[in-house]
Amino acid sequence: MSAYKTDKEETKEPGVVSDVLEYVVNALSLWTMSAIAAIFYIAAMFAGLGVIISFDTKRKRFLTRSLQFLVVVTAFLFTITGARIHQFERTDRAVAIAGNVDAYDSPSDKTTTVFTFHEGTKVRLGRVEGNYVHVTLASGYSGWVDRAKLTRI
């Protein structure tokens, strides 16, 4: 069987851009990212208020440019924070509770085994069909697994 894989197999590494983006998104805790985004939001509000009430042309120009910068940074930080929230809240996860768990190419144990993973391996859950659930490993492998061999975390 040439299609058979194991979770110990080497996987293709992602590119530099995706590595940098993943590092930026996961660099700080969710609470810290939220606090930094809120601080930049408040600073942008004060800069906007300064633009409105300022009568000095030089100060107004400086505050306008500061406001533009702060709005861009705030939008970026809120986007990253939203991505983190989506990553934590919207992903169902499970862990293998059986010794060796076979993943199949369709929701039946009478089909081809695609790969095997072991007890304690964490997986992302996908759609459910009967007693089978579609799972994805951190390495990117995916297949159908008997739900009785997993427990949600």
Image (cartoon, helix red, strand yellow):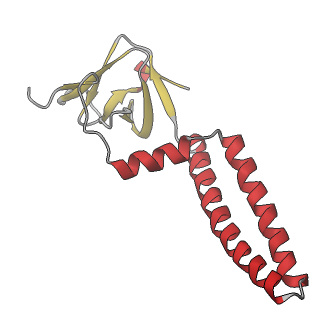
Image quarter of residue 62: bottom right
Q: Residue at x 32, y 33 (%)?
A: 144
148 over 111 or under it: above or below: above
Residue 126 position within the rendered picture, expressed as x and y whole percent measured from the top left: 42, 40
Residue 61 position within the rendered picture, expressed as x and y whole percent measured from the top left: 75, 84
Could you tell me how many numbered marks the image carries? Answer: 0
Q: Residue at x 87, y 87 (%)?
A: 56
Q: Locate the C terminus and report the quarter of the image it occupies.
A: top right
Q: Residue at x 26, y 30 (%)?
A: 108
Residue 111 position within the rendered picture, expressed as x and y whole percent measured from the top left: 19, 30
Q: Is residue 40 left or right of residue 21?
A: right
Q: Locate the N terminus and report the quarter of the image it occupies.
A: top left
73 over 106 or under it: above or below: below
Image quarter of residue 75: bottom right
Q: Residue at x 64, y 63 (%)?
A: 73
Q: Is residue 108 left or right of residue 130?
A: left
Q: Is residue 43 left or right of residue 142?
A: right
Q: Observer-nearest residue: 4 or 20?
A: 20
Q: Residue furthest front?
A: 58
Q: Residue furthest left?
A: 1
Q: Observer-nearest residue: 148 or 74?
A: 74
Image quarter of residue 48: bottom right
56 over 96 or under it: above or below: below
Residue 65 position within the rendered picture, expressed as x and y whole percent measured from the top left: 70, 77
